Amino acid sequence: MKTIAFTLGLTALAAFAPASATPTVGEAMPAFDEVSIDGVALNNETLADTVYVLEWTNHDCPFVRKHYDAERANMQNTQGAAVDAGAVWITVISSAPGKQGHVSADQARELTTSRGAKPTHIILDEDGNMGKAFDAKTTPHMYVADRTGTLRYAGAIDSIRSADPADIDTADNYVLAAVNSVVAGQEVVNKQSTPYGCAVKY
């Protein structure tokens, strides 16, 4: 009886234990099912046979501001180059209501226009379900998927971990390099890096 009770106890604990949500490079992207601010269904099925980038953002984060800095416009240029190469760019905002970086759909559109941003789609992940499925830790936090739905890159946008826009000029842009390799059917050289930035405000 003690053995049965112990086993049942472990089963109960397992039922309440959080599932591992760490995406693995070289494996399938985590399952997600969201709708963009413009009503476009975005999930593993609708993005099949598509190279796509996921960008976690928070417009009030100084690390995000670094990459959207008007002078260097690094994020905007990376978005534009990725889209020109044939990728779909999806910006995800996981800030919960009342938390830093939370915006309405209209505010997200205004930010896109005012900053000259070039995402294909924007997702408001207010409940944090998508962010937690991808284990998104920072803003920015970046992911690149290939046409088979396989995660090919995860981590930082570039190689210099700072909030100083001046560092962009000498940094290696991991995301754009990954997109170009995936589109060309080549192996991604830098497959993973440690993301840097502000903690996602779930």
Image (cartoon, rainbow, N blue to C red):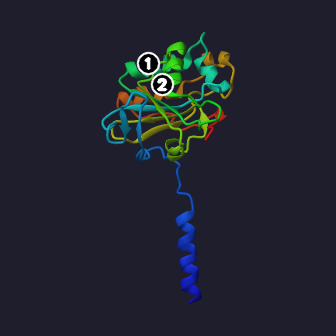
For disc 1, the neighbor class at 10 Å (few under 14, some 14 to 19, many from 20) is: some
Percent x, y of residue 110: 52, 18
Marker count (numbered): 2
Q: Residue at x 63, y 21 (%)?
A: 65
Please, what secondary structure does the residue beneath circle 2 have?
helix
Q: Which mark is residue 21?
A: none
Q: Which residue is mark 2?
A: 176
> Viewer-proximal residue, 118 or 177?
118
Q: Which residue is mark 1?
A: 81
Kindly identify the amino acid type of the residue bearing the numbered disc 2. Leu
> Viewer-proximal residue, 6 or 189?
6
Q: Which picture quadrant has residue 169?
A: top right
N-terminal-most mark, 2 or 1 = 1
Percent x, y of residue 20: 53, 55
Q: Residue at x 54, y 19 (%)?
A: 111
Please, what secondary structure does the residue beneath circle 1 have?
helix
Q: Residue furthest bottom?
A: 1
Percent x, y of residue 115: 54, 15
> Viewer-proximal residue, 51 or 65?
65
Dot 2 and dot 1 residues touching (CB under 8 Å): yes
Position of 57 relative to 12 (above/below): above
> Which quarter of the figure is the C terminus placed in?
top right
Q: Which picture quadrant has residue 83?
A: top left
Mark 2–mark 1 distance (CA, rounded to whole Å)? 7 Å
For disc 2, the neighbor class at 10 Å (few under 14, some 14 to 19, many from 20) is: many
Position of 65 relative to 140 (above/below): above
Q: Residue at x 58, y 27 (%)?
A: 158
Side (left or right) of 137 relative to 51: right
Q: Residue furthest left?
A: 49
Side (left or right) of 148 relative to 157: left
> Which quarter of the figure is the N terminus placed in?
bottom right
